[in-house]
Amino acid sequence: MRGIKEFLWEEDGIGVVEIILILVVLIGLVIIFKDKLTTLVDNIFSTIDTQWKKI
């Protein structure tokens, strides 16, 4: 019975604060590298489009 209580009160998981911090960092990186990401995605889609037409 004691083992079950200890299991329920464990705090070893990822908390809300950690998840929010990770999201803030990811959003910041997207904002900083927005132009490069847009160019990269455009290049990828144009390559897919040209390869699709060859099939």
Image (tube, grey):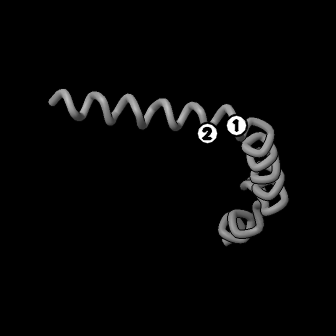
Image quadrant where residue 13 sits: bottom right
Image quadrant where residue 34 sits: top right
The x, y position of residue 7, in whole percent, is 69, 63
The x, y position of residue 32, in whole percent, is 80, 39
The x, y position of residue 42, in whole percent, is 51, 36
* Residue under the image location 32 percent in, 36 percent down: 49
| Residue picked out by circle 1 | 35
Image quadrant where residue 54 sits: top left
Q: In what element is the residue under mark 2?
A: helix
Inspect the image, locate mark 2, and give the three-letter code of the amino acid beneath it.
Thr
Structural distance between the alpha carbons of marks 2 and 1:
5 Å
- Residue 33 vs 8, above or below: the answer is above
Q: In what element is the residue under mark 1?
A: helix
- Residue 39 vs 31, above or below: the answer is above
Dots 2 and 1: beta carbons under 8 Å?
A: yes
Number of residues whose C-alpha sits closer than 10 Å to that of mark 1, classed few (under 14), some (14–19) or many (20 or more): few
Closer-to-camera residue (9/22):
22
| Residue picked out by circle 2 | 38
Closer-to-camera residue (23/5):
23
Number of residues whose C-alpha sits closer than 10 Å to that of mark 2, classed few (under 14), some (14–19) or many (20 or more): few
